[in-house]
Amino acid sequence: MDREKLQIQELLCTANRNGAVHGFKPPNISTSPGTALCSDADNSENAYLPTNNNTIHFKYNLLDELLDVTQVHGPWLTKHPLPLPVWAPRAKDVLKFDSVLQYEYFASQIEFQIQQLLEHHNYNTIGNFLALYQGFKESGCYNLRDYLHTYLPPITPIHHTCVGLALELWTKLVKLNEKFPGLTNYLYLVSCEENIETVDEYTSLGDHLETVVTSLEKEHVLLALRFEISGRYGVLLCDPGKFVQSQEAHSQKEYNYAFSSNMAFIQWTEILTKTNGVTTQDVALIYISKPYLTAVDVTERRNLVYNFRSLLSRDSKGILKAGVYFKIKENYDEFTIFYQDVGVKKRLKYNFGMFLQGKRIDEGTQEILRECSTQLNLTNDALESILISLANLLCDQDYIKQLLEINCQINNLAADN
């Protein structure tokens, strides 16, 4: 327990003049019951630990405290569909290595933690979708846009989007502090804007993204670390919130990463080549200069109203194993299930309508659902229960219409990027 206390202290209470571990967040005078505030006057190993004598659930306590220290609420303009993104005022420090060999050993230790995370945590944008709807119905509010202004997106270990997975990885890397003292002080979240068409114009902004902040949606989040090897600068990107489909039956994906000319961004190019030879290319830009402080308030909130949902399990290399996914459209209820059957990936399409109350699901379909549920690391009947909940949600056409309108507004504000 003493070792865990020290690890939490290193992660959450090693503040420099640039702010706490991740970036800048002024401490709140009013804290949650039973929680001590880390300050210049209290830099002991007990800081940020519960002050009562209850058992500490280290993993979840650390995640909660990490959220408290690294995240802020972005300003929300009237009639704007999202809060505005916020970054720390200064860059994180650079972790220095004496040799490439030393860095490669370090990177291998990070990679192992990522592989463990990928294998044991699903990528899940269905859980937060259902949670939002449940909260909305229980609130008595009829306007989804109004409700979103008061809604605090939950980050839970079983409902991880890219935001939750990046934060979960950060908590896991705490254990590497023994091998690499102070490691967690160098980690930080970075924001990513996808499907960029005006790459040169966007990257020319450098560290002045605030000048176009009302046109940003920041769909994706990664964990990053800046490093240097004998004078050569680099950035380590950890992306547990993306899955790899390097080779599918009808297509192949390749990824390329390169610094922008001003070193403020990493240009992430995804090249999709189909078996007929047709190639398409998408470009995303990862802003690496400063820590991103609104991953929950902006990125997670943006994800809540996105018109595509999925629940996916992956192997240690990020290759998809099993899952369910669907588009959200008005008067549309089709979804796809895929799973492994004796080493062969099977995909099947169904309609949510078959899961509505009173409908009988045939034994063959139930067997497929149980197998997919098992490969998703869920209980046998969990996937069927999730699909029943989704079927009932999608029947609420007024809610779906409101959600799609908000999604469209967000797409429109970012259309010029």
Image (cartoon, rainbow, N blue to C red):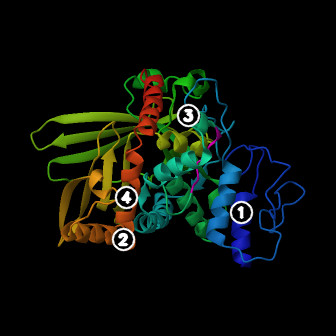
The answer to which of marks 4 and 1 sits earlier in the sequence is 1
- Residue kind at label 2, given as amino acid type: Asp
* Residue placed under numbered mark 4 in the picture: 388
| Sequence-earlier tag: 4 or 3 | 3
Q: Position of residue 208 (x, y in %)?
A: 60, 25
Residue drawn at (20%, 48%) of the image: 252
Q: Label for residue 335?
A: none
Instruction: Name the residue that disc number 2 marks.
Output: 381
Of residues 226 and 102, the one drawn nearer to the viewer in this rendering:
226
Query: Separation of disc 3 and disc 2 at Cα?
Result: 33 Å
Label 4–label 1 contact, CB within 8 A: no
Residue that carries the numbered disc 1 in the rendered image: 10
Q: Is residue 21 above or below residue 259?
A: below
Q: Front-most of 149 and 293?
A: 149
Q: Nearer the viewer, mark 3 or mark 2?
A: 3
Tell me what residue is drawn at x 70 percent, y 66 percent: 8
Which of the two marks, 1 or 2, is nearer to us in this view? Answer: 2
Closer to the observer: label 3 or label 1?
3
User: In this orientation, does residue 265 appear?
Assistant: yes
Q: Which mark sits nearer the N-terminus, 3 or 1? A: 1
The disc labelled 3 sits on which kind of residue?
Asn
